[in-house]
């Protein structure tokens, strides 16, 4: 059993960025490495806590039993805090491997992804917590992080909870489709790019007529064909001018989307609305950007979607685990660790088809040219 665990770790380690141990030194995570024999032992111990869902105290016990470390839960918490920059740099390296390193354009000062997830801690009486966070791109630095309960006023996901600066482009999924939230972003002299929720879409054309979204979408008939329409949203304090940009999915992507919707409806025993399957044929976004082309707007959202693939896995992984609530540093490090595990999972799936007969990747300097 021990040999199998060691082999599994070797396979996982082969998926890490080539400079992962150097990153530990550069970030200061290895400063005064007391209680750990190496950077590898520290990494394995941190992943015990982050990926396996153990509390800090349980992790310290498991690490000692596995001869990885001899530390207290308090010392482990300090190590987690000091590893924040290290874990973030590993995430950035893995994202670069996926081709995600987009520079800002034109008048956009900073790209910011706003997202959230709910964490349920283990046990029948485990607490639930909502994590709302903001990541800057392409650096992936977390510039806002808030933990709250899941009920009560002001605990939901909203742009209004995030400190937004001028000339930023704020990206959000359909859960952030809210006229009040979009109005808040514009009041901060920032732009927004958000996935449209067709069920809650209320907008008007430049002449004041109600926009019928589905009739506009039906003009896009071929896979990959794009369209845009100027619209006005009516906020509480002002009207918000912007554009709906849409692209028709490939037939394969449409079939996948329909199957997901049908499985969800069957599982929850609900009836889908008559137009749900029609809307699923398109990716529909709203933006207040004016100078960029439709293709550029969709490219911005594509970047968010690529990271969303990792986020989806991270959100699944976040359901189990003890979220460190002692301070923002430890909570951010935990978040980066969750994202790292999600990105490693994504990479494992990607290379799994081509993995070598002996079961793991060779270091690059041992591979044939």
Image (cartoon, rainbow, N blue to C red):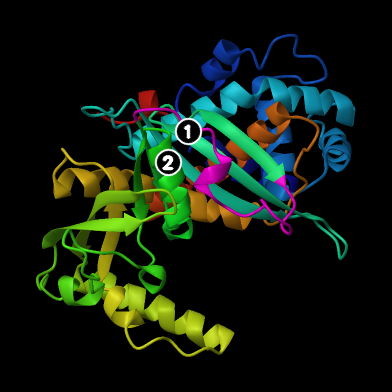
Residue 362 visible in the displayed image: no
Q: Residue at x 16, y 49 (%)?
A: 294
Question: From the viewer's perspective, is 66 left or right of 28?
Answer: right
Q: Residue at x 86, y 65 (%)?
A: 124
Residue range corresponding to the magenta coloring: 148-167
Which badge, 1 or 2, comes first in the chain's sequence?
1
Q: Quadrant of residue 338?
A: top right
Question: From the viewer's perspective, is 307 left or right of 152?
Answer: left
Question: From the viewer's perspective, is 34 left or right of 364?
Answer: right
Question: From the viewer's perspective, is 281 left or right of 349?
Answer: left
Q: Residue at x 33, y 74 (%)?
A: 256
Residue 185, numbered label:
2
Q: Quadrant of the C terminus?
A: top left
* Vertical position of residue 225 compared to residue 60: above or below: below
Q: Is residue 70 magenta?
A: no
Q: Nearer the viewer, residue 290 or 85?
A: 290
Relative image position of residue 290 (x, y in whole percent): 19, 41
Report how many numbered discs are placed on residues in the image: 2
Q: Would you name the residue on which mark 1 appears? A: 164
Relative image position of residue 128 (x, y in whole percent): 76, 56
Q: Nearer the viewer, residue 280 or 250?
A: 280
Q: Residue at x 49, y 35 (%)?
A: 135
Q: Are marks 1 and 2 in contact (CB under 8 Å)?
A: yes
Q: Is residue 165 magenta?
A: yes
Within-10-Å neighbours for mark 1: few <14, some 14–19, many 20+: many
* Separation of residues labelled 1 and 2 (CA atoms): 7 Å
Q: Secondary structure at mark 2?
A: helix
Relative image position of residue 106 (x, y in whole percent): 21, 27
Within-10-Å neighbours for mark 2: few <14, some 14–19, many 20+: many
């Amino acid at each position: 059993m021990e040999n199998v665990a060691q082999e599994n770790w070797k396979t996982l380690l082969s998926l890490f960025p080539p400079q992962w141990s150097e990153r530990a030194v550069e970030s200061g995570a290895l400063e005064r490495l007391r209680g750990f024999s190496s950077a590898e032992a520290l990494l394995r111990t941190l992943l015990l806590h982050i990926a396996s869902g153990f509390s800090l105290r349980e992790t310290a016990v498991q690490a000692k039993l596995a001869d990885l470390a001899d530390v207290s839960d308090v010392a482990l918490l300090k190590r987690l805090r000091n590893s924040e920059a290290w874990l973030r740099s590993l995430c950035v390296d893995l994202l670069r491997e996926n081709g995600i390193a987009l520079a800002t354009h034109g008048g956009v000062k900073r790209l910011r992804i706003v997202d959230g997830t709910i964490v349920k801690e283990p046990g029948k009486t485990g607490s639930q917590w909502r994590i709302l966070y903001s990541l800057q791109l392409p650096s992936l630095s977390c510039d806002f992080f808030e933990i709250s309960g899941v009920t009560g006023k002001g605990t939901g996901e909203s742009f209004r909870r995030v400190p937004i600066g001028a000339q930023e482009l704020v990206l959000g999924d359909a859960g952030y489709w809210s006229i009040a939230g979009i109005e808040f972003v514009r009041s901060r002299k920032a732009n927004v790019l958000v996935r449209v929720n067709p069920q809650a879409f209320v907008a008007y054309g430049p002449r004041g007529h109600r926009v019928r979204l589905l009739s506009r979408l039906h003009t896009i008939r071929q896979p990959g064909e794009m369209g845009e329409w100027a619209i006005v949203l009516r906020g509480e304090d002002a009207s918000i001018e912007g554009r709906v940009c849409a692209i028709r999915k490939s037939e394969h992507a449409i079939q996948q989307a329909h199957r997901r919707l049908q499985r969800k409806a069957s599982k929850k025993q609900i009836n889908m609305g008559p137009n749900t399957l029609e809307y699923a044929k398109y990716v529909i976004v709203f933006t207040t950007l004016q100078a960029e082309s439709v293709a550029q707007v969709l490219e911005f959202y594509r970047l968010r979607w690529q990271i969303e693939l990792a986020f989806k896995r991270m959100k699944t992984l976040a359901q189990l685990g003890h979220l460190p609530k002692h301070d923002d540093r430890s909570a951010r490090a935990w978040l980066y660790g969750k994202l790292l595990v999600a990105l490693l999972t994504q990479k494992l799936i990607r290379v799994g088809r081509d993995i070598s007969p002996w079961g793991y990747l060779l270091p690059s300097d041992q591979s044939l040219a």
